[in-house]
Image (spheres, rainbow, N blue to C red):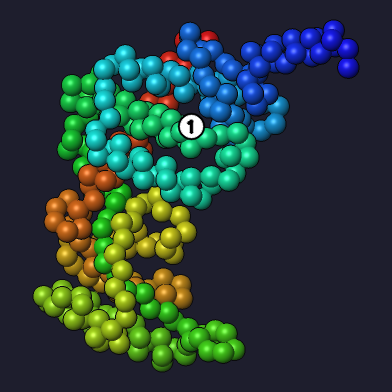
Amino acid sequence: MGKRIVVFLLALCLISISLYGCSGRAEITVGGTKVSNDVTAYFKTLVKEGEDVKPLVSRYVAVNSEFKNKGLSVPASERAALSEKVNDLWHLYGSYYESKGISKETIYKIELSKVYETLLLEERYSENGESPLSESDIKAYFRDNYASIRFVTGYLFNVDENGTTEMTEEQKNALTSSFNAAATAINGGTDISEAISLLGSPEIHSAVVSSTDIGSFPDGFFDAIKKLDTNKSAAIVLGSYVFLVQRMDAEDGEYECYSEYRSDCLYQMKGEEFEKIVADLAKQYK
């Protein structure tokens, strides 16, 4: 190969590297901030072929910049949880991301930006924020839409080597009656761990359920739970299932979950409004 051709190809290679990076993807500069190739590659996995990735990159830079401009910080507990989350994501999807030229460090950056966005949301609607929302309003939403429960599941069908067969009405009534008896015992002061002896000592589960749950439980499950007072129990029959449910205190004690779901409540209350604010902010980052 002639020297001129070698020099020409080397020049092309250098131009290619400066424009596209080693992986062949062009770097994007947004509002003076250079976004790395693999961050852009991540956002390309979120759009359909032929769609412009730049609005997503602009949004990413806008959120990060706004977080820095406001002088906010990520609590140590949040960073610890974030590292664990990224490790889990990488364990599940690392091979896929690597095939797209996306590093684990980049996944951390992406997930960190999501934390920034949540903290910006909380800052905006905090007591001293631009659009303050009272804690009592958030708790009222939580009480209407979330519940912490302990429960046992019963099945109104029989299972054998030939598959499933529907119970007779007599069998269904007997099982439902035993679940009602267990609920009555709990409401009379018996602990659920003792009350389930009436059911053959099945496994007790705990869960946080919400009005937005889809597929986790049969339709109507949350509506039935919402009628229960704290620490009260009931047998709930839905379709082919019967549940022994005890509603726990979701704001205090062992089954408290308000602190975990507060941000979710805030987003459900103000998310649509906040999304418009972030979108308008991103437009400023060309």
In the picture as drawn, the residue positioned furthest to the right comes out as 1
* Residue at 30% in and 36% down: 79
Image height check: is 34 above or below 82? above
Residue under label 1? 106
Q: In which quadrant of the rendered view does residue 154 lie?
A: bottom left
Image height check: is 173 above or below 95? below
Image height check: is 136 above or below 129? below
In the picture as drawn, the residue positioned furthest to the left comes out as 189
In this rendering, does residue 273 appear at all? no
Residue 94 location (% of width, % of height): 53, 45
Residue 48 location (% of width, % of height): 66, 33
Residue 166 location (% of width, % of height): 51, 85
Relative to 57, 255 lies left or right: left
In this rendering, does residue 160 appear at all? yes
The residue type indicated by label 1 comes to: Thr
Q: Residues within 10 Å of mark 1 (few under 14, many from 20)?
A: many
* Residue at 57% in and 16% down: 28
Q: Decide which of 68, 157 is in the foreground and name it.
A: 68
Quadrant into which the N terminus falls: top right
Q: Decide which of 141, 116 is in the foreground and name it.
A: 116
Circle 1 SS class? helix
Residue 82 location (% of width, % of height): 35, 40
Relative to 223, 162 lies left or right: right
Q: Decide which of 172, 76 is in the foreground and name it.
A: 76
